[in-house]
Structure formats: structure tokens, C-alpha cells
């Protein structure tokens, strides 16, 4: 069960600053799709709009045809969201937190217990299940964050900077987990790490100053000049274009 | 929907009692209420002795010597209830200031607002938790007026009226405080506004001599204390209940609008 994501002419303005400019994108069901770009490119803003945390100034994002602007909660039922630097309820134990998030997503009784148990197993949280989230390492908190996002088995998983701050071993582990979601779920993630996008994603979109610069496939990246070169080339072109304007 | 609301209510309750503020506020309120109640009780006893003492020498105890206006309602019940309402006003912003602000400053609002909860559900759960805490506070202080009721001619209806008033008033103050918390990132700013609004609306008696009769009458309708005192005297009137319910509704609406605006910003 995976979802299709369509963003149409999304524009987001914060005061004078334009975070997203006429942003249009399609993500096919089952894809692991990456958004890359320098700081302030609009990656996180787009994910927040998709997750219903922010509204676009204009334009719309649809998940399986359901508009996030007009039917936010219906879209939110279909997605799991992992925000940058996992912001979780530190005073809850892992189990209490997962139960809470399951209930907030409408799970109860046996379904809730099963979903929590599955999450604990899937993300190897058994040894910390009774510990308070506030005392967990960053790696464990990231796993808890992923576990909560997948409790209701959503067709779409949205992840903002999944491996930031993790050690190399944790990064590898987490990349493997995210890659394994592809096919059954659509995964949309944003990252600063080009190697990560290259390793995990089927397709990658490059954003620069709120605009979509290019979309490239994994095959193109592997057979071509590589993501790093594409990134530098595109950002350089964008900067030159900006100067000549 | 009910399940989600109940889950969020439980989470809010857990967060509230995980912080020392709830215990400090509850203890401070009950202790202050007790101390001031005891002070009014001593004053009332002193008055009784003064009036009775005039006749004690000749014919012993004679309640007929005590002026009618010196009674447990005027000397104990009303002043104690007024103090309780001021203490509520003094401590409640310390509870309400964190409710929305903390979620924002810790970034957990991003987690909460990306679950399929409607804005009104989030707001209602947060408000309901705080109202529940107000109920606990008020119930904890009920022992003092209950003593007056059992030891005097005042009926149970007086106690019920007083507590209906305190509850309506406390909930309205909490709702305004929560609205303030939803409007800002700073807990200090939220608390300051939550103090300023009810204190500004407390009483306009000092201003009335400078105003026309119609303006003074209008201000009397706006003043918090005027509406509360009716309950304290054992009178339950619909217009006073509507006044406090209106304040509560305003707090709820502002909180909801504030969350929606934050989403659109």
C-alpha cells in the first residue's frame, strides 16, 4: 500500500521571504524520493506543508488525490511524519509514547498493542521500551520517531533529515531501514547528505532558493557525473542566474 | 474522535503533573486559602467576643447584642471567598502559561499537529485538562467554606452557589490564560498578559464617580468581581453564568484561531 504525491504550484511566503516558489512535483507510489538542496532551499518547508503542519500561501499538495489544504486530517491519516531532530515527549517512556501516538492516530485495543509491539521489534527498541525518551541517545530517539510514524502502517512516510547527528554505524542501519520501506510505502525524505540520497533514493529532486532545479533518477546518477557534481553544477547555475538578474 | 480526545487529555494531564508547577501552585493555593480563612475566622471570633462581652457581665451570653450585619456570611464567608478568587487569579497564569508555549518551544507541536487531530480537538483537550486542574484546586479548598456552612445557619445552597461561581470564574480565567499561551512563544509574556487582562477587568468602582451613569452601568457589567459576588452571596443568576461562559468561549475561540493562524503563517 503506497501513495501518490502531487504538488501543484506550491508557493510559500514567510513575510518578505519566499520559501517555495511555484513548486510542482510528482512522486509515484512506492518510490523512495529524495529532496536535496542547500540550507534555506525550501525542503523542510515543503515536507511541513505535505504533513499539514503549515499551509501553502497558494497552490496545493495532494496525496492520492486528497488535498492537504482542504482535507488536512484525511491526508494526515495516510502519512507518517518524522521531523528533523526528533522532537518527542521526553517525559514519556518509549512504550507510553508509542501507545499515545497510536491512539492519536485512531488505534485502540488489540490493534494498538500489535502495532506498538511491531514497532518495538522492527526498530529494536526492546531494551529501552521502559526508559524515558528524555534519557535516550539520539539514535534511539530517531528510531522511536520512525516507529511512531509507522504505527498505523501509512502508505506515505515523510522524513526530514533522517540521519543527521547519528554516528556512521547508526546512519548505515537507518538507511537500510528506510530503503526497505520502498515499494510497500512511498517515502519522501529530505537530506543534506548527497551520499545518503544517492544510496537510498529512486529519484532525487534538487531545490535551490525555493525552486525545483531538476529531478534525476538513481540510474542517471550512477551512470552520470554523480549527485555531488550535479548539485554543485545546479547551485552554481542558479547563483549565476541570480547575479545576472 | 472520543478516543483521540481522551488520549490527548491523558497526555496533557500527565505533562501537567510531571512538572513541579502543578504541585507548587496547588499547595500555594490551598495553603494561602487556609491561612486567610483562619485569619477571617479569628477576626469574626474577635468581633463576637467584643459584642457579647458588653452583656456578659450582667446576663451571660446574649446573641441579641450582636448587630445583624455581623454574621458568618458577611464576616467570614464573603471575605474568604473574595480572597480565594484573588488567589486563583494570582496562581492560574503560572499553570496556563506553559500549556501551548512549552509545546512550541520544545518543538513537539510539530509532532502533535501532524497527527490527524482537528485543531478544535487539540485546543479542547488542552483546555479541558486545565479546567480539570482548576476543579481540583477549588475542590481542595472546599473544606474551609464547608466548615462555615456546617457551623452556621448558612445552608448547603450557599456552598453550592459559591463553588459554582468559583468554578465558572476559575475556568474563564484559565481559558483567557490559555488563549494568551497560544498567542506567544514566551511563557513569561503569556503569564504577564494572563495577569493583566483579569486584573484590568477586576473592578471599576474606583472609576465610576468620574463617569456618566450609563458608562458606569456598562462598566459594572464588565467587571469580574460584580459577577462573582452574586455567587458568593448565594445567588445564582443566569446572566453571571453567561458572563463567565462567554469569557471561556472567547478563550477557546482565540486559542483555536491562534493555532490556525500559526499553521498559515
Image (cartoon, helix red, strand yellow):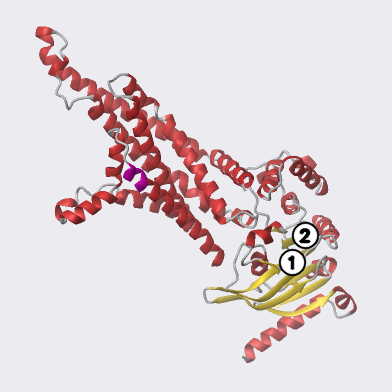
The label nearer to you, 2 versus 1, is: 1
Mark found first going from the N terminus, 2 or 1: 1
Q: Residue at x 12, y 18 (%)?
A: B65
Foreground residue among B217 and A235:
B217
Q: Residue at x 59, y 67 (%)?
A: A55
Relative vertical location of residue A111 with respect to residue B158 in this rendering, above or below: below
Q: Residues within 10 Å of mark 2 (few under 14, many from 20)?
A: many
Residue A195 placement, left or right of B63: right
Distance (Cα) linking label 2 and label 1? 10 Å
Residue A155 numbered tag = 2
Residue A64 numbered tag = 1
Q: Residue furthest bottom?
A: A244
Residue A36 appears at what percent x and percent y? 74, 72
Relative vertical location of residue B129 with respect to residue B189 in this rendering, above or below: above
Foreground residue among A214 and A110:
A110
Residue B249 placement, left or right of B222: right
On the question of residue A80 being in view, the answer is: no
Foreground residue among A98 and B231:
B231
Residue A237 appears at what percent x and percent y? 72, 86
Q: Which image quadrant: the N terminus of chain A?
A: bottom right
Name the dominant secondary structure of the magenta segment. Answer: helix
Instruction: Assess whether mark 1 and mark 2 are in contact (beta carbons under 8 angstroms).
Output: yes
Amino acid at each position: 500500500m503506497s501513495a501518490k504525491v502531487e504538488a501543484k504550484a506550491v508557493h510559500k511566503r514567510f513575510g518578505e521571504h519566499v520559501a517555495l516558489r511555484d513548486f510542482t512535483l510528482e512522486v509515484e507510489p512506492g518510490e523512495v524520493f529524495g529532496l536535496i538542496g542547500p540550507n534555506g532551499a525550501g525542503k523542510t518547508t515543503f515536507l511541513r506543508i505535505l504533513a499539514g503542519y503549515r499551509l501553502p500561501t497558494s497552490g496545493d499538495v495532494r496525496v492520492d488525490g486528497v488535498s492537504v489544504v482542504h482535507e488536512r486530517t484525511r491526508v494526515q491519516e495516510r502519512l507518517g511524519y518524522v521531523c528533523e531532530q526528533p522532537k518527542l515527549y521526553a517525559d514519556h517512556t518509549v512504550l507510553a509514547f508509542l501507545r499515545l501516538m497510536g491512539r492519536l492516530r485512531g488505534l485502540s485495543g488489540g490493534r494498538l498493542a500489535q502495532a506498538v509491539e511491531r514497532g518495538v521489534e522492527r526498530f529494536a527498541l526492546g531494551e529501552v521500551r521502559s526508559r524515558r525518551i528524555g534519557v535516550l541517545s539520539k539514535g534511539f530517539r530517531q528510531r522511536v520517531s520512525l516507529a511512531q510514524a509507522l504505527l498505523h502502517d501509512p502508505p506515505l512516510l515523510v522524513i526530514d533529515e533522517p540521519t543527521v547527528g547519528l554516528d556512521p554505524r547508526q546512519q548505515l542501519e537507518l538507511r537500510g531501514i528506510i530503503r526497505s520501506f520502498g515499494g510497500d510505502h512511498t517515502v519522501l525524505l529530505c537530506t543534506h547528505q548527497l551520499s545518503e540520497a544517492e544510496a537510498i533514493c529512486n529519484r532525487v529532486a534538487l531545490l535551490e532558493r525555493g525552486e525545483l532545479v531538476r529531478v534525476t533518477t538513481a540510474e542517471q546518477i550512477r551512470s552520470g557525473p554523480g549527485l555531488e557534481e550535479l548539485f554543485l553544477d545546479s547551485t552554481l547555475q542558479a547563483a549565476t542566474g541570480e547575479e545576472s538578474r | 474522535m472520543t478516543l483521540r480526545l481522551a488520549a490527548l487529555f491523558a497526555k496533557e494531564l500527565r505533562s501537567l503533573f510531571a512538572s513541579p508547577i502543578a504541585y507548587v501552585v496547588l499547595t500555594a493555593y490551598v495553603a494561602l486559602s487556609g491561612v486567610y480563612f483562619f485569619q477571617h475566622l479569628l477576626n469574626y471570633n474577635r468581633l463576637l467576643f467584643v459584642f457579647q462581652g458588653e452583656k456578659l457581665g450582667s446576663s451571660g451570653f446574649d446573641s441579641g447584642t450582636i448587630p445583624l450585619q455581623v454574621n458568618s456570611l458577611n464576616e467570614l464567608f464573603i471575605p474568604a471567598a473574595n480572597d480565594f478568587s484573588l488567589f486563583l487569579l494570582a496562581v492560574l497564569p503560572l499553570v496556563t502559561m506553559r500549556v501551548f508555549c512549552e509545546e512550541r518551544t520544545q518543538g513537539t507541536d510539530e509532532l502533535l499537529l501532524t497527527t490527524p487531530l482537528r485543531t478544535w480537538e487539540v485546543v479542547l483537550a488542552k483546555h479541558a485538562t486545565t479546567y480539570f486542574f482548576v476543579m481540583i484546586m477549588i475542590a481542595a479548598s472546599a473544606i474551609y467554606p464547608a466548615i462555615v456552612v456546617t457551623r452556621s445557619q448558612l445552608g448547603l445552597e450557599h456552598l453550592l452557589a459559591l463553588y459554582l461561581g468559583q468554578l465558572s470564574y476559575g475556568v474563564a480565567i484559565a481559558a483567557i490564560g490559555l488563549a494568551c499561551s497560544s498567542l506567544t512563544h514566551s511563557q513569561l509574556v503569556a503569564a504577564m498578559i494572563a495577569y493583566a487582562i483579569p486584573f484590568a477587568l477586576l473592578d471599576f468602582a474606583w472609576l465610576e464617580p468620574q463617569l456618566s451613569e450609563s458608562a458606569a452601568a456598562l462598566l459594572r457589567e464588565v467587571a469580574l468581581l460584580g459577577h462573582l459576588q452574586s455567587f458568593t452571596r448565594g445567588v445564582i443568576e443566569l446572566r453571571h453564568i453567561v458572563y463567565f461562559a462567554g469569557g471561556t468561549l472567547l478563550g477557546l475561540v482565540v486559542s483555536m484561531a491562534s493555532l490556525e493562524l500559526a499553521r498559515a503563517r
